[in-house]
Image (tube, rainbow, N blue to C red):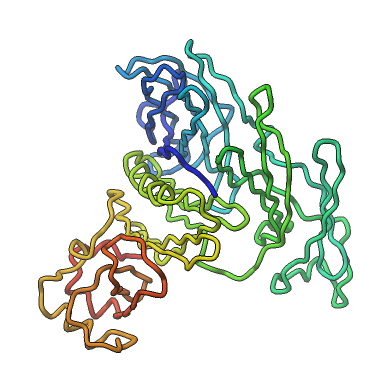
Amino acid sequence: MFKKFLLCGAFVGATLLQITVANAAVIATAQADVDGNKVKEIIELHGNKIAQNGDYYTNLMLFIKNSDGSIKTAYEPNIKGGYGAVLEIYPVLDQKERILLSVPQGSYKAPVEYRIYDIDTSGNVKVLFDQVDNMGMAVQTKYLPDKKIETQFSIDGQNLTNTIKIDDEIDMLGIYDGAGNVKKSYIQPKVENIYSLTYSDDLYGVQNIKDESSNNVLGKVYTVWKMGDDDKWYIESARIKASSSKPTRVNASADKGKWQIHPQDWIDTSIPLIYVSGKPEIQNKINEKITKWIELSKDVDERAYRIDFAGPELLSMHLFRKEEGQVPLETIYNFDMKTGELVSLNKMFDVKNKDFLELIKVLGDPKPEEEINKLPNDWYYVGSKFVFTYSEAKEHQEELLKERVEIGVPAIKLYSFVKEKTLPAE
């Protein structure tokens, strides 16, 4: 469903006037034809790192530079700071492109500050999606008996009411008594600011409905935004759904300190967006590879991802897509988070050692129905074991789920064959 045309990493570094040289950083750069002159400008977001070894940046400044590096304009976003940032570029008419800036405001569970900027030929900056928009849709909430939530909101002057059922697995003992009656009517669920905003002709925003502790996501608010005649975005429709409490690695977030995964969600679609603090080239490489996967088929009904392993130096994950009435397709990605490059089987393991294949034969689980006489075509890591795949697909190539054989081997048994020994570290 989502079409990401040019996904570029962003960054945070020193402001024009309030610069602390020791902690200044450029977190990422991007290129886009922001004024429609058929020449790509250079986009940079700068800021100051509060602590030398920290990952929070403040004093943000957006620079638009000409292709020769000279400054065309500089603009200070009305965002106090954040843990990294990403710039996405999307096209409008006449080959002109606009900037979608996202800045996480805390851990991976926190909302994200989003802004959309339009730049004219004179370098003037127009904000099309601002701080107030980023608050999302105003929703009034209250707990109802039997673990339900009533939501009330207004769209285009029409007042709407919706009721969702809280997942039975979520502990709500502080709100309900044993009979399911509300015992603390003065406590209400809270609707947070937008945590996911994605462009695909329209804007698609998602907000979390959480309990008072913010530990439990009780539901989600999905909003579709249309652009008005004034070039600003307005909510056209909304949908509210209950959330499951079951922990899962599918469409999950991850926070490894120096890098984070934030899901770009919609109702039946989720795409991982990677933030790498202070490493623009790494962030760009990873997100661009994910974008290429998206562009294999833009009009897909469902997308998902699964985090197999997230460590300081290794991200092992699956990307899935499914067209209506078709069998799901999947692709394995193993990213070296130090470089942003994919880690091939040959790079990760000493495959030339004849004992490598023999060990897979002997220790592999489950035992394959046919004897293994060739190297695996791909691999991924799940924290305690390496999983090797056999199919007709090439490494990092999309394939049908049902056409693949997987064999797991305990990681400790393969340690002597692992060439990149620091990658699997927790």
Q: Residue furthest left?
A: 353
Residue under the image location 52 percent in, 25 percent down: 93
Residue under the image location 70 percent in, 51 percent down: 221
Horizontal relation, residue 111 to residue 38: left or right: right
Q: Is residue 37 visible?
A: yes
Q: Indicate the quadrant where residue 10 lies.
A: top left
Residue 65 locus on image (x, y percent): 38, 19
Choose between 127 and 14: the one closer to the eye: 127
Q: Is residue 42 above or below residue 56?
A: above
Residue 133 locus on image (x, y percent): 67, 34
Residue under the image location 43 percent in, 60 percent down: 319
Horizontal relation, residue 72 to residue 109: left or right: left
Residue 316 locus on image (x, y percent): 36, 62
Q: Is residue 10 above or below residue 68?
A: below
Q: Indicate the quadrant where residue 203 lies.
A: top right
Choose between 80 and 389: the one closer to the eye: 389
Q: Is residue 59 visible?
A: no
Q: Is residue 124 above or below residue 103?
A: above
Horizontal relation, residue 208 to residue 306: left or right: right
Choose between 304 and 93: the one closer to the eye: 93
Residue 267 locus on image (x, y percent): 63, 56
The quarter of the image holding the C terminus is bottom left
Count all numbered tags in the image, as a single digit: 0
Q: Residue furthest top?
A: 122
